[in-house]
Amino acid sequence: MEIKNPIPFAAAIISAGIIVATAIGADSFLRAKQLSNVLAVTGSAEKIVTADTVKWQSALSRGVDAAGLKTGSGQIKNDIEVVKQYFKDNGVQDGEIIINPVIVSPVCESQSGMFYDKFGNQSCGGSRTIGYNLQQVISIESSRVAEVAQLSQAASDNLIGRGLVFTTQSLEYYY
């Protein structure tokens, strides 16, 4: 068989190729689109547990003028004793209370002059120090989770009502 005009034959073969390529491309697109409708699950399980240890951090603070650092230190010591007694009156044992060292930070006349050295110590630089903030962090770690949680809710109101500057943080629960 001899083809007299090869152009229509070539056009038919090219057209058939385009139709087959389009069908393959459409099928691939539909398969890829179907993959986005699939939910893949990895092995995971959940179990509700009850914490057996609670950690609660709170802090006392005092602000004093530049000459009142010694007075502020005495005030914070008295405040610690008030807080410890309040905790003991509410069932917290001595071994559950952790008293951290006092943190002393200068209060600068100009906040823009404040900077920190490579050890994280705050300084007023060229600005004048007009006072100090003293802060002491108190932690309670206990296995009596419910009691400490209840105490943390009431402590701020009670201690602030006694004239203390008392702040509290969220409880941390451990299992």
Image (spheres, rainbow, N blue to C red):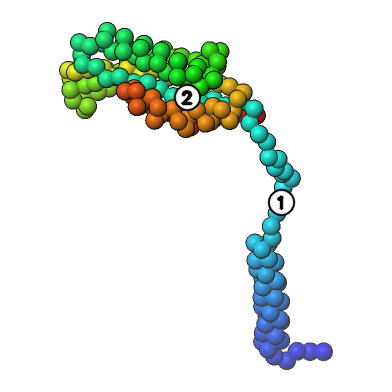
Numbered tag placed on residue 41 in the rendering: 1
Amino acid type, callout 2:
Gln
The residue wearing badge 2 is 57
Q: Residue 82 appears at what percent x and percent y?
A: 40, 16
Q: Which residue is pictured at 69% across the width and 57% down the height?
A: 39
Task: Determine the secondary structure under disc 2.
Answer: strand
Q: Nearer the viewer, residue 14 or 76?
A: 76
Can residue 50 be seen in the rendering of this structure? yes
Q: Nearer the viewer, residue 44 or 86?
A: 86
Marks 1 and 2, the one that precedes in the sequence = 1
Which residue, as the protein is rendered here, is positioned at the far right?
1
State which quadrant residue 107 falls in. top left
Q: Nearer the viewer, residue 31 or 147?
A: 147
Numbered tag placed on residue 10 in the rendering: none
Amino acid type, callout 1:
Val
| Image position of 78 (left or right of 85) | left
Q: Residue 136 appears at what percent x and percent y?
A: 39, 17
Task: Determine the secondary structure under disc 1.
Answer: loop
Q: Which residue is pictured at 20% across the width and 10% down the height?
A: 67
Q: Residue 19 appears at what percent x and percent y?
A: 68, 79
Which residue, as the protein is rendered here, is positioned at the far bottom?
4
Q: Which residue is pictured at 34% across the width and 23% down the height?
A: 162
CB atoms of marks 1 and 2 within 8 Å: no
Q: Residue 166 appears at what percent x and percent y?
A: 37, 25
> Dot 1: within a 10 Å radius of its alpha carbon, few (fewer than 14), some, or many (20 or more) residues?
few
Q: CA distance from mark 1 to mark 2?
A: 39 Å
